[in-house]
Amino acid sequence: MNDTKPCPSPLDRLSRLRGVVPAAVMVLIATATSGCVQTALDDLGDAAPQISTQTMAEMRQKKMSPQSPVLVRTFKEESELEVWKQDATGRYRLLKSFAICRWSGKLGPKKTDGDRQAPEGFYSVSKSMLNPKSQYYLSFNLGYPNRLESALGYSGTALMVHGACSSSGCYAMTDQGVGEIYAIVNASLGGGQRSFQVQALPFRMTAKNMAEHRSDPNFDFWKTLKLGYDAFEATRTEPRISACGAKYVVNAEFQGGDPDDPLAACPARIDNPDPAVAARIKTEDAELAALLEKDGPSHLTAYVDGGMHPSFRALLKQHGPQKLAEKISNIDYPVSGPDAALADPYEKD
């Protein structure tokens, strides 16, 4: 169904055009052809912690209510955040995609306080983790480190999705973006959802994208994230995430319940695999194995410090960091690392 597919990424269009159109023009093309993001500063509008009239209309059209459960996915490489909500069938359906103005670090999980890495993993956000008085306008805490990350000795605090366009390990959405995201998740939590899942991912985890990152040291870790990604793609239901054997385990039921120690060996599983999930994983595994047997391109390994959605990169290039910062936030926070944000992540060494 077309309406459940992610909003086409300008990076997908950009990669197909590379080598055909001059690089200086490509970001502007990506900006102009994206139907999900703004193309000019004047299109940004005012920040407001409420669900927009347009989004409310989309909910009605997709048979969702403001109180229906929500799920969030973030993708570093594409610099996009997706908000999914349950529709009348009880399955999740894509409501809206938001451009990420700034994230810091590189592809890969956060491990150490101060490493500037934005988290990757599975997180659960409850009402108490929303901050209506954030120094970045509005925010919600991802809950990093989660149980697995804590057991692995990872450190860091206050990793957020927030406003403005400044990141030191967070996902900065602009005040306008986070205002609506905050309103959507707040309505779901107020409607009875105890917590919502955030899937923080390095990129859209297709077999093709995985193969293009075959040489990355995080490849094995990403394969565990892909199991959750595939389960959601196959069923449009929230995957159940456990941790044992020092890794995430998806949709598992164990003898004696979930293990207390995420580093301990996994107990015997007693669940019956979902046929739709099993079929997708089998197909994806076969495609990935075939791609790994071939020589392929190394992809997106040249981040200077984090990323920025092409639409914001074009605005930054056109107007400069000060004017962009003033437009996307009423709080005096500059665009973090503007030179790094302007760097072409596709540039090879």
Image (spheres, grey):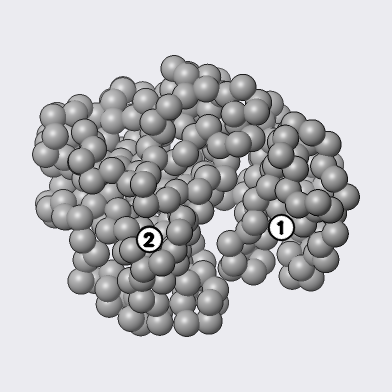
Q: Please tell me which of labels 2 and 1 falls first in the chain.
A: 2
Q: Tag 1's secondary structure? A: loop
Asked if the residue under mark 1 is in contact with the one under mark 2, i.e. CB atoms within 8 Å, the reply is no
Quick check: 5 left or right of 62? Answer: right
- Image quadrant where one finds the N terminus: bottom right
Q: Which residue shows up at 37% across the image and 64% down it?
A: 188
The foreground one among 27 and 272 is 272
Separation of residues labelled 2 and 1 (CA atoms): 23 Å
Residue 140 appears in the picture as rendered: yes
The quarter of the picture where residue 252 lies is bottom right
Q: Tag 2's secondary structure? A: helix
Quick check: 334 left or right of 32? Answer: left
Please say if 261 is above or below 116: below
The quarter of the picture where residue 60 lies is bottom left
Q: Which residue shows up at 81% across the image and 51% down it?
A: 256
Q: Is disc 2 surrounded by few (<14), some (14 to 19) or many (20+) residues within 10 Å?
A: many
Q: Which residue shows up at 84% across the image and 53% down it?
A: 255
- Image quadrant where one finds the C terminus: top right
Q: Position of residue 128 (x, y in %)?
A: 36, 47
Amino acid, disc 2: Leu
Amino acid, disc 1: Asn
Q: Which residue is mark 1?
A: 251
Please say if 293 is above or below 81: above
Quick check: 60 left or right of 232? Answer: left
Q: Position of residue 148 (x, y in %)?
A: 64, 35
Q: Position of residue 320 (x, y in %)?
A: 18, 30
Q: Nearer the viewer, mark 2 or mark 1?
A: 2
Q: Which residue is mark 2?
A: 189
Quick check: 290 left or right of 107? Answer: right
Please say if 65 is above or below 148: below
